[in-house]
Image (tube, grey):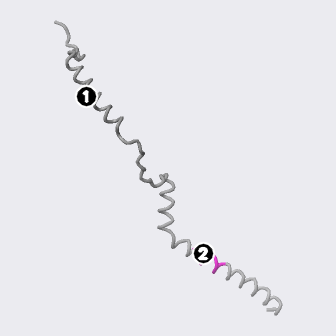
Amino acid sequence: MTKKSNRPKAKSSAKTTAKATTNDVVTTEIASAPTTPQPRPSRAPKLSRSQIASERIEEEYAYITDDLRRVFVLAGAIFVLLIVLNIVLSRAGI
């Protein structure tokens, strides 16, 4: 017993002729179509994962940067106050 072949059988010439005429009609329609290019819709620029993550982090922690700025300003003011007090108190002899 021979093994079955998975190859498709040879097609008859009548079917090939029918396909050829449909292909001719399609190419005629394509050739007569207008050649003005359609404008493409603009795409938003693609962002990498790190860019998306950094934008999300900036949005979530925007209040922290304001708080840190206030803390540094207060720390600087206190440091300047300590230096001024040291100079004033050392001259006063206390």
Q: Quadrant of the N terminus?
A: top left
> Mark 2 belongs to which amino acid?
Arg
Residue 16 is inside the magenta segment? no
At a point 29% along the width and 27% down the height, the residue shown is: 24
Q: Is residue 84 above or below residue 50?
A: below
Q: Is residue 50 above or below residue 7?
A: below
Q: Is residue 32 above or below residue 50?
A: above
At a point 40% along the width and 48% down the height, the residue shown is: 38
Q: In the image as oriented, which residue stretches furthest toward the top?
A: 1
Which residue is the site of mark 2?
69
Q: 36 left or right of 22?
A: right
| Percent position of residue 62, x then y | 51, 70
| Percent position of residue 21, x then y | 25, 25
Which residue is the site of mark 1?
22
The residue nearer to you, when weighing 1 against 26, is 26
| Percent position of residue 25, x then y | 28, 31
Nearer to us: label 1 or label 2 = 1
Q: 67 left or right of 23?
A: right
Q: Quadrant of the C terminus?
A: bottom right
The residue nearer to you, when weighing 93 against 42, is 42
Q: In the image as oriented, which residue stretches furthest toward the front?
A: 32
Residue 73 is inside the magenta segment? yes
Instruction: Provide the residue span drawn in magenta.
Output: 68-75
Q: Main secondary structure of the magenta part?
A: helix
